[in-house]
Amino acid sequence: MKVLVAVIMYNESKNIEKTLNDLQSNNNNLFDIVVIDNGSSDDSVDKVKKMGFPVVAHCVNSGSSMGTVRGYFNYASAMDYDVLCQFDGDGQHLANELTKIINPILNKEADYVIGSRFINKEGFQSYFIRRLGINLFAFLDSMAIGYKVTDVTSGFRAYSKRTINFFAKHYPHELHDTNQLLILAHFSGAKILEVPVLMKPREFGESEYNMMNALVYPFKGIVNILGCLLQKNIVQKYKTVEYGN
């Protein structure tokens, strides 16, 4: 099966080379790598090109990492990949943990796998304020889909071919946060699984979740959850087409 690891980045000049080297050293020809850049203003893209990796570069910043998510769904669907993994370019994800999120897809145990920091509570657990938001949306999303999830904002995720094509076909421009990904995938018939993973704090740079984003995100997130609930009946119609249910 064709497996793609999509490395997302924005101004990660000090992190991206180490991230890509980590992936290469743990690859063994198991997966392809593409970098999805969100309009970086530093020399991140130049560094990636010098290392010989393909880059899909946005000409302007989309405003959040979901711009790169939309980009990698469209790329993976167009290139006919069977499995797609998101891997952040900030160095927080560990390449030797990839099999934990890939294998459930390969073994047809799941269509959407989330690598969770909070199942075994090992490794970097994020910062206190961020965890408050994660816990809030873990509760809301769990209520929406009917079973418990713990790390709804995790960027360490994998998707099956059916899930790739569902988002590429039906939501090529309209994805705004991870709440949408989870809830819409569930409504469309995807089997969702969380697995425990280790993460580490970024060494350099800053997260896109600055103070302003941290204040605004809860309001946007609640609006997006309500929007997903309103689309439930429409999205469930795709089950037969996308998942054969």
Image (cartoon, rainbow, N blue to C red):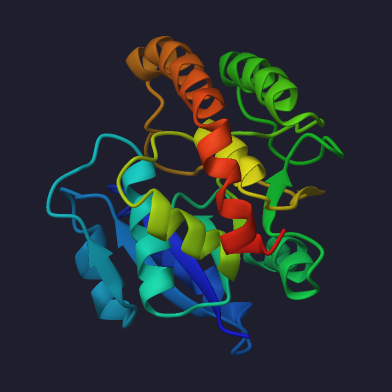
Tell me where residue 193 appears, x and y as whole percent. Answer: 77, 49
Left or right: residue 244 versus residue 163 is right
Which residue shows up at 63% across the image and 88% down it?
28
Tell me where residue 192 appears, x and y as whole percent. Answer: 73, 49
Which residue shows up at 69% across the image and 59% down it?
111
Tell me where residue 16 appears, x and y as whole percent. Answer: 39, 60
Left or right: residue 42 versus residue 137 is left
In front of the other: 232 or 166: 232
Residue 237 appears in the rendering: yes
Query: Which quadrant would the N terminus be assigned to in this image?
Result: bottom right
Q: Relative to residue 168, is residue 61 depicted above or below?
A: above
In which image quadrant can residue 154 be found?
Answer: top right
In front of the other: 189 or 149: 189
Q: Residue furthest bottom?
A: 29
Residue 94 appears in the rendering: no
Tell me where residue 172 appears, x and y as whole percent. Answer: 33, 52
In which image quadrant can residue 133 be found?
Answer: top right
Left or right: residue 103 versus residue 126 is right
Which residue shows up at 25% across the image and 75% down it?
49
Query: Which quadrant would the C terminus be assigned to in this image?
Result: bottom right
Q: Residue furthest right?
A: 120
Q: Relative to residue 141, is residue 20 depicted above or below?
A: below
Left or right: residue 101 versus residue 218 is right
Q: Relative to residue 234, is residue 10 depicted above or below?
A: below
Which residue shows up at 38% across the image and 42% down it?
66
In front of the other: 102 or 105: 105
